Image (cartoon, rainbow, N blue to C red):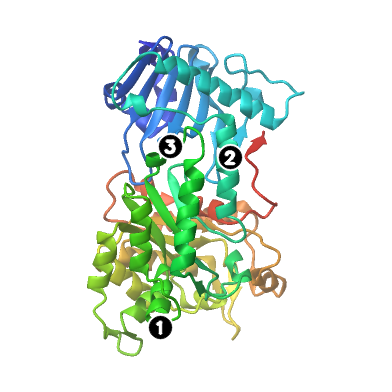
Amino acid sequence: MVYQKFRENVEGPVWKSLDYSLRQMEILQKRRVIQGEGVEVYLVPKTSDSSDPEFYMVTDDNVLVRISATGSPIAIYNQKGRGATRRLEAVVEKDTKETYHIYRERLPVNGVTENPSLTEYQLLERLLDYVKKEEAVARRGESSETGKSFKTLSYNAVISRFDFLQTLTGGETIIPDQYSDMIFIPYSDGCNYRCVMCPVSRTKKFRPGTETKFTRAVDHIYNSLATIENLNMEGHSEIFLNGTDAFQQEISYRQGKTDLSLTMILDIVHERFPWISKISAFAGSKSVLRLAGYDNSSGTFSQDIFPFLTGLQDKRLVRLYHGLETGLDQGLKRINKPVNAEEQEAAINILKRAGFPIKEIVLVGTLGKEFTTDDGITFTWRDHVNATAELINRTQPYRVMFSENRAYRDLKRAELVEQGLIVEHEGPKGIEREQRTLMRKIRLTETRGQRDDRFDSDYQEALPNTDGENSVVKIH
């Protein structure tokens, strides 16, 4: 078989370094869905909470292509070297913002050569044409029922999808886990917080969406995606509700400021996308505590919020992102987040008790090597790390996402640095040390796999770019 030949041409350590799913040889072999002449396609099942099923297309010219369930090419790998130096290299990789990165020096790929006269767009077109050609060969082979759903997006379809997604993620949008099988739907504008490091702080205050506006947005997104040639709509497995705080939307509804509740949002989504099994959103501590009738002085609750929360889960809201930032009260005050560590912990415990998996977002580098409060007391990065690790160890979230500081010059944090109230780390090594120390001190007892599987280190990639608009392709 082509796959066996490919396997024989790749030494074990190289194969293991490529992807978790490629290490599970027996599982992968049992998932072959197409066998064609010189090309095979495998379905790689979901094996962790951070990944969805993918197709792996392997060719007899030693090229491997990863393709999402929607048909969007994710990466193209080429085999290079001989003997002990033999290795697999990514020629093309797609990042979380749907940008394709092409590494010229790793070409050729089956006739697609490094040609200085070609633009990055022409190179991407030729590479994706190669993928389409191999797909056509595969589809003439023997196929299982699953294999019949295998298809890839053309260059034009990739461009169309990218351009459309940019209309959904412009401005100050933050999509924490953006990937090819996700749809994101906006339901509100703005944010009630004015955190000094967050680009969303530049926008207006939170403004809840209305039923008419949200329904139109859902219909527009569905219809626009449906027009993209070869896009497998039902390959989308998750919807992210694009707004800063889903529970603030519910509060606005209960206050009579909008006719759209959080429950209605989920109903409208399922009416248009009935196959979707996962919906996720941001959750803010203040809004959760307000819905629960939290009393700061006594630490008690006057409202039974749990029937409401479990009802949301029944409608497939199954994952929440929560901005912990830091477990240090003085640090929260320095970044202007209007909540203290005790309130953060109370909100997390409510959501966890209701059964929600929580992805905690933690700052790395934002409070600097040290920072000074308004009353002149100085705290170091170790104070931030110790308090944060202790709070996480008490609350035990499902995953921790590290958000490395991004240098937005027009935000309040830049002023604090100029005033000496935040002293920056001495280069990237200081930030790396802070993150390593956090990882060492955090003890997630519910870990089901390797320790590092419960940490995401690239949340900052979800933030708006500091260097202009996104591009569909970049050359390296």
Say which amino acid is labelled 1: Gln
Report which residue position mark 2 lands on.
Answer: 160
Distance of label 1 from label 3 (alpha carbons): 40 Å
Nearest to the observer: residue 186 or residue 367: 186
**Residue that mark 1 sits on:** 255
Secondary structure beneath dot 3 equals loop
Mark sitting earlier along the chain (1/3): 3
Circle 1 crowding by C-alpha within 10 Å: few under 14, some 14–19, many from 20: few
> Does any portion of residue 341 appear in the rendered image?
no
Q: Considering only order in the chain, which callout, 1 or 2, is on the residue closer to the N terminus? A: 2
Position in image of residue 406 (x %, y %):
62, 58
Few, some or many C-alpha atoms within 10 Å of disc 2 (few <14, some 14-19, many ≥20)?
A: some
Number of marks drawn: 3
Q: Which residue, given by chain and number where applicable, does mark 3 sit on?
A: 70
| Disc 3 packing (10 Å; few <14; some 14–19; many ≥20) | many
Find the residue positioned furthest to the right. 117
Coordinates of residue 434 in the picture (x, y in percent): 51, 58
With respect to residue 152, does 249 lie above or below? Answer: below
Q: Which amino acid does label 2 sit on?
A: Ser
Which residue is painted at 40% across and 77% down in the image? 253
Left/right placement of residue 141 relative to residue 373 reads left
Q: Earlier in the sequence, mark 3 or mark 2?
A: 3
User: Looking at the image, is 287 positioned above or below residue 316?
Assistant: below
As measured in the structure, the alpha-carbon distance from the residue carrying label 3 to the one carrying label 2 is 14 Å
Q: In which quarter of the image is the N terminus?
A: top left
Q: In which quarter of the image is residue 203?
A: bottom right
The quadrant the C terminus occupies is: top right
Q: Is residue 381 visible?
A: yes
Amino acid at the residue labelled 3:
Thr
Q: Do the residues labelled 1 and 3 touch (CB within 8 Å)?
A: no
Please name whichever residue, 151 or 201, is drawn nearer the observer in this view of the structure.
Answer: 151
Front disc: 3 or 2: 2
